[in-house]
Image (cartoon, helix red, strand yellow):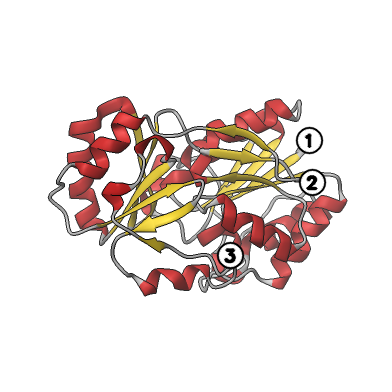
Amino acid sequence: MMRLAAFDMDGTLLLPDHQLGQQTLESLQALHSRGLHLALATGRHLLEMQTLREKMILPAWLITGNGTRIHDRQGTRLFGCDLPSAVAEEVIHRHWETTATMHIFNDQGWFTDRPQPELLVAHQMSGFGYQLCDLKTLPAHQVTKICFIDRHQHLCQLKTQLDAVLGNQVNICFSAEDCLEVLPANCNKGSALALLCDHLSLTMAECMAFGDAMNDREMLAQAGQGFIMGNAMAQLKRALPHLPVLGHCGTQAVSHYLNHWLATPHLAYSPEC
């Protein structure tokens, strides 16, 4: 019996234009009315997700920063994890052989040192955006995660450098083809979902989860039922070949599945074309 549903945002719940479809919102509200807990599990910042939750009028638990923060439906923090100060210092101040832009996140917001207005398109629904500053002036003891944005091939080369220098001190993963994230070790959406389940006296077997990128891997693998989007990263599909693949986020495939599950849970599901 499923009692909690956890959803990634971009590429999963949201349409390709980063808006929430009305059909998807109605399906989420139907889940809530059936008594299921809802969790939004995303790499987005808490400040942004609080705004989006209010706009959706949805009583959801929030897993933000790819598992670095968990907040209840009233906004109380249940869990927080930051990068070790020495690690954040190393990443921020070392010279990396890359063309990628660096983005630093802490509880005050999103910081970068180069204007990239094209990145703000994904945040139009909330109005959330970056703050420009000299990144080397930011306090290293308050960093939740560090992201690098560039073409995928360039980020793969950067990941090799990061792995060699940082080793198992961190969790390095792709949250999108063009976004590589440096997170605290053992911190991911899966570990955060497990903590939330423990708080709610649930088991992971009572969870369903939906995602499309490598930062969703642990959550999808550990949930009682994980679902991969048709538009998911190829690496994710290869990593979890046993999990069912739904349709594309552009067709609101999560809503398509949820409507089937709510109406006819005893019947096999066939993804829409």
Q: Give the side of residue 266 with respect to residue 115, left or right.
A: right
Vertical placement of residue 205 versus 34, above or below? above
Vertical placement of residue 99 versus 86, above or below? below
Discs 1/2, front: 1
Q: Give the side of residue 204 with respect to residue 150, left or right.
A: right
Give the alpha-carbon distance from disc 1 to disc 3, as whole Å: 26 Å
Residue in the image at 77% along x and 38% along y: 3
Badge 3 or badge 2: first in the primary sequence: 3
- Amino acid on which disc 3 is placed: Leu
Question: Circle 1 sits on which residue?
Answer: 1
- Amino acid on which disc 2 is placed: His
Give the alpha-carbon distance from disc 1 to disc 2, as whole Å: 12 Å
Q: Tell me, yes or no, whether the two marked residues, 1 and 3, touch with CB atoms within 8 Å.
A: no
Q: Position of residue 251 (x, y in %)?
A: 60, 70
Q: Secondary structure at mark 3?
A: loop
Q: Secondary structure at mark 1?
A: loop
At label 1, counting other C-alpha atoms closer than 10 Å, the crowd grade (few under 14, some 14-19, many 20 or more) is: few
Q: Position of residue 158 (x, y in %)?
A: 20, 47
Q: Position of residue 74 (x, y in %)?
A: 76, 45
- Amino acid on which disc 1 is placed: Met
Residue in the image at 20% along x and 56% along y: 154
Question: Circle 2 sits on which residue?
Answer: 266
Q: Quadrant for the C terminus, please.
A: bottom right
Residue in the image at 76% along x and 61% along y: 27
Q: How many circles with numbers are drawn on the protein?
A: 3
Question: Circle 3 sits on which residue?
Answer: 14
Residue in the image at 52% along x and 74% along y: 17
Give the alpha-carbon distance from disc 3 to disc 2, as whole Å: 27 Å
Q: Is residue 141 visible?
A: yes
Discs 3/2, front: 3
